[in-house]
Image (cartoon, rainbow, N blue to C red):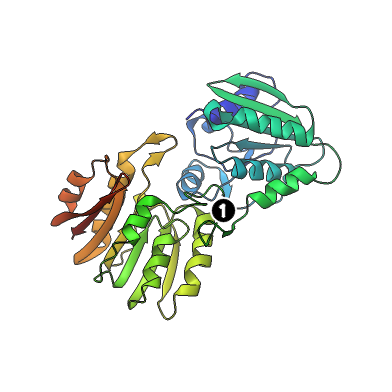
Amino acid sequence: MTTIKALLYPFATGMLALPAQALMLRARADAALEAGWQTRLACVTGFKPDHDALANAGFRVTQTVSDGPYDAALCPLSKHKADSLAAIAEAWAALPVGGLLLAAGDNDTGAASLQKDVAKALGPVESASKFHARIFWTRKQAGAMPDMLQSWLAGGRTRLVNETGFHAGPGMHGWNKIDRGSKLLADHLPGEVRGRIADLGAGWGYLSSKLLKTGRHLKGLDLFEADAAALEAAKLNVEPLAGETPLRFHWADVTQGLPRQRYHSVIMNPPFHSGKATDVELGAAFIEKAAYCLEKGGLLLMVANRQLPYEAVIDAHFKDRRLVAEADGFKLIEARA
């Protein structure tokens, strides 16, 4: 991951003076930040792994922008254009007149296009290219927030998505479409998925919503999700369906452990990307944590990309497994603790 290194490049080379107090929106943990930035950088992120890693490294970390003043705002850009534009608008709003707005993104995430959008909204920008990334910056001018930035803010918010009928927002996994793997799991929910249930990596709550819509009796449903915004969307989607089922929502990095709670069943469509790279260890960690929290004889129902080699990990932590279904490049696996 080169985005953070690219973001700091203008400071490292003297193109820009180091800020006294800076803000980073959608902050990411990165070794490039550890060289003296702790005292000058406030980090904003709703992603639990980055939140915890940054906090452990000595940074000030919050989920929302806290009062400044800040003389610079830094925006690492992602492949989610609407979310990146919303972050840029949030950064602009947090700055005083004359404050530095700096953004960087890998070339294959559309950073050049975002630079053009910012120039159209805010006027001329300066730029550089390094580490296969585009870096660009400008200074905040006096005046009210431009209409384009207001539309960027609105475009980044959670909303009811017409295509799915669920609440979600840009930056969340599969925010404007139903994930095909999750649909495969939802279409094969066995009747024995009842009692106390854990939904690991719940996202904006699709699987939990489908489970509740079956009308079966549940003693409780716990949703675990690392993305705070997705978890808030899950509340909007799941709570109206719960009836008398007790719900608990956990902002959590599943790979770092779960509460000492025994569940009858675990449902999950675990993540398998770390940045842009496939990371089988992520799914493996989910499997290990699922085994840890299931009661004896408990059921794991897991969907994954067909080519991901999770079977050996499942066999190491569960008594037996079987392939329930395959479709659209996904496999649905059932395992017994």
Q: Is residue 133 above or below residue 87?
A: above
SS for callout 1:
loop
Residue 202 occupies which quadrant of the picture?
A: bottom left
Q: Is residue 146 left or right of residue 286?
A: right
Identity of the residue furthest to the bottom in this view: 244
- Side (left or right) of 321 relative to 198: left
The spot of residue 223 in percent (x, y) is 41, 63
Residue 68 is situated, as x and y percent measured from the top left of the image, at 72, 47
Q: Which of the pair 277/42 is nearer the observer?
A: 277
- Where residue 122 sits in the image (x, y, percent)? 78, 35
Q: Is residue 66 visible?
A: no
User: Residue placed farthest to the right in the image?
Assistant: 143
- Quarter where residue 148 is shown: top right
Query: Which residue is rendered at x = 27% and y = 62% of the image?
Result: 293
Left of 7 or right of it: where is 56? left
Q: Tell me, yes or no, if residue 1 can be seen here.
A: yes
- In the image, residue 98 sits, relative to residue 244, either above or below, namely above
Q: Quadrant of the C terminus?
A: bottom left
Amino acid of disc 1: Gly
Is disc 1 surrounded by few (<14), some (14 to 19) or many (20+) residues within 10 Å?
A: many
Q: What residue is rendered at 13% in x and 56% in y?
A: 320
Q: Percent x, y for residue 198?
A: 34, 64
Left/right placement of residue 43 relative to residue 201 reads right
| Residue on which the image places disc 1 | 169
Give the residue displayed 32% in from the left and 46% down from the top.
328
Write the residue at 64% across / 43% down: 87
> 217 and 294: which one is in front?
217
